[in-house]
Amino acid sequence: MDTKRDIVAFNKILNIFLSVMDNTLNKQQIIKRKPTLDQIALLSGVSKATVSRVLNNNSLVKPDVVARVQKVIQELGYIKKRKSVDISLPFSKLTVICDDSAVASNTFYGNLLSELKQEASKLSIQLEMSMFNQLTSPSQANQKLSNIEALLILGNPNKDIVHLASKNNLPIVIINGLDPYMKTQSISPDYEFGGFMAADYLIKNGHTKIKILTANDRHSTFQRTDGFLRALTMSGIKYDKSDTVVDFINYVDKVESSRNLVGNALITNPSGDFGAREILPLLIKEKVFDNCSAVFCICDMIALSLIEALSSVGIRVPEDISVIGFDNLAVGAISSPPLTTISTDYNKIAQTALNKLISSISNTNKVTTTRSSVSVELIERNSVRRI
């Protein structure tokens, strides 16, 4: 027996065995992770470029090499990445029709418009603005709609614009408003639940004598009031609606505006405070807040104005009166005290509105008209005291 020859043969077999084992272990380790082209190339004994050619069915690769690479691909469970599909959008320019309040940055519409710009930019959609109000005439409305590809309306829509848009089959979605005839799709925060959530939070903190500061001139403010009162009813709290619901509309003719605003113009002013700056001193003078421990304001701008007005007469928040707002504007986080509020997901509203618009055009079947609500959440800070 040739011992030397046997040792050489044994070493060859051992090396082959170790090589196979090493290759098997490498495969097992790779399988545990997501396999890559580099790993396939290593186990196949070819270059990464060759692996790429095999994946793309290049006829220049020899059949035996193709078979070897495909075997490794199958063993590793590699899945070829699909090429991204370029979706052709049905429009390239989107017109946003709104009133003056969207111009102010620190308001609901200011925040929403910022998110709309970002989301439209991601889709390479050009955004343009066109201002309007409820007094815009039919001829002006018709002029605004000329050469428009798609339309978003912020707030309560001018009836002439909605009618003309529908008549001309113009794709349209309303944000934070609605079509009373339910012919146009719309998207808003869940105001009713937000009002319920605010009252429920105050009640859970021991408050039973609570009021709501509102201006019930539109669907969204009525919803907040309805949710607020529903929470009181479900908690078994007895209330007089005429006392609990403090409606600014009942006071507009009793105040002189420092901004030269008269009547309903005071409620719809661009600052977004529903005339709180002028009306609140009158409410305090009439002792509206003397018989309550907490106030829910339908927006942060009213809440911040209330804190300031109360402070000016020595009433402390939250020590004397607790205050909660709605909208989660950035200024509320740095107010004194920082404002507890109901938060709206502006980005989700912007995304959903654009998706509704695109779907309504892309879908060959008639799209069912829907009114959608985006969820809200409570942001707890320091303006509510537990009693």
Image (cartoon, rainbow, N blue to C red):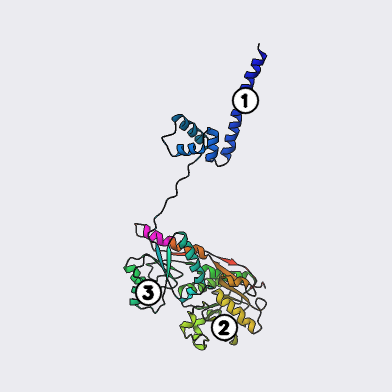
Residue drawn at x 48%, y 36% is: 50
User: Which residue has dot 1 on it?
Assistant: 15
Query: The residue under label 2 is which amino acid type?
Result: Leu
> How far across and down, in percent of the image, does residue 209 sit?
61, 77
Q: Is residue 360 magenta?
A: yes
Q: Separation of disc 3 and disc 2 at Cα?
A: 32 Å
Q: Main secondary structure of the magenta part?
A: helix
The reply to whether the magenta stretch includes residue 23 is no
Q: Which residue is mark 3?
A: 159
Residue type at the position of mark 3: Lys
Taking depth in this image into account, of 355 and 66 the one nearest to the observer is 66
Which residue appears at 59% of the width and 37% of the height?
Answer: 29
Residue 233 or residue 271, whichever sits in front: 271
Residue 238 visible in rendering: no
Total marks shown come to 3
Badge 2 crowding class, 10 Å Cα cut-off, few under 14, some 14 to 19, many 20 or more, is: many
As displayed, is residue 376 above or below residue 59? below
Q: Image point 55% across, 35% down: which residue? A: 42
67 sits to left or right of 332: left
Position of 143 with respect to 339 (left or right) is left
Residue at image location 50% in from the left, 71% down from the top: 110
Give the quarter of the image for residue 334: bottom right
Front of the two marks 1 and 2 = 1
Which label belongs to residue 280? 2
Instruction: Find residue 277 and report its horizontal and vertical position in percent.
Output: 55, 82
The type of residue carrying mark 1 is Asn
Quadrant position of the C terminus in the picture: bottom right
